[in-house]
Image: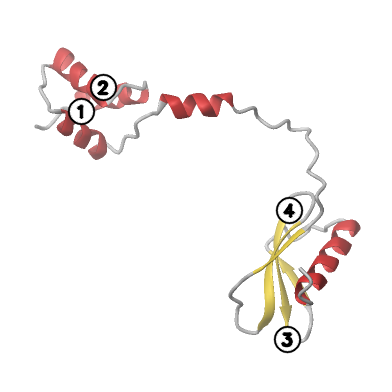
Amino acid sequence: MELSSEQKEAVKQWINDGAKLVDVQKLLSEKFNVKMTYMDVRFLVDDLDLTMRDPKTEAKEEAKPEPAETETPKQGGVTVEVNPVQRPGVLTGGNVTFSDGVQATWELDAEGRLHLGGAAEDYRPSQEDIIDFQEKLRAILSGNM
């Protein structure tokens, strides 16, 4: 059964308002005198690319407190990771997250030069972060971590 554009819009609105499939089935019957099986309503919702709302999930999301915008970044220092697979021409490389939350990639080339990338071009980590990064990188590369 093909629904009119008015009926499709009504279904979209009902789903957006949080109606369940059984509710849509009932409303189609009451408002438009359209009889559909539960499975047909399910297919209709899929065909219209609609997403069912889950009140339980929404309640959990609403209960989560939003972090304060003035919150300072956690002072845990720098985290350094090594990628398990390296690009050609690179001895080793990986990812780094500085204490201010900025993430970047790092690579050590065959000449021993360290390259940082992936962050804003004008980004400069703090002196403390640079020292922390170098110490952790040295420990990782020497096998002490």
From the image, tell me which residue sits under label 3.
110
Relative to 79, residue 13 above or below: above
Classed neighbour count for the residue bearing mark 1: other residues with Cα under 10 Å, few (<14), some (14–19), many (≥20):
few
Quarter where residue 8 is shown: top left
17 vs 55, nearest the viewer? 55
Look at the numbered discs 4 and 2 and tell me whether their residues touch, using CB distance below 8 Å. no
The circle drawn on residue 10 is: 2
Q: CA distance from mark 1 to mark 3?
A: 64 Å
Mark 2: which secondary structure? helix
Q: CA distance from mark 4 to mark 1?
A: 48 Å
112 vs 135, nearest the viewer? 135
From the image, tell me which residue sits under label 4.
102
- Mark 4 or mark 1, earlier in chain: 1
Mark 4: which secondary structure? loop
Residue 121, how many percent across, how many down? 74, 61
Q: Amino acid at mark 1?
A: Ser
Classed neighbour count for the residue bearing mark 4: other residues with Cα under 10 Å, few (<14), some (14–19), many (≥20):
some
Mark 1 or mark 3: which is in front?
3
Q: Amino acid at mark 4?
A: Val
Farthest-out residue, front: 144
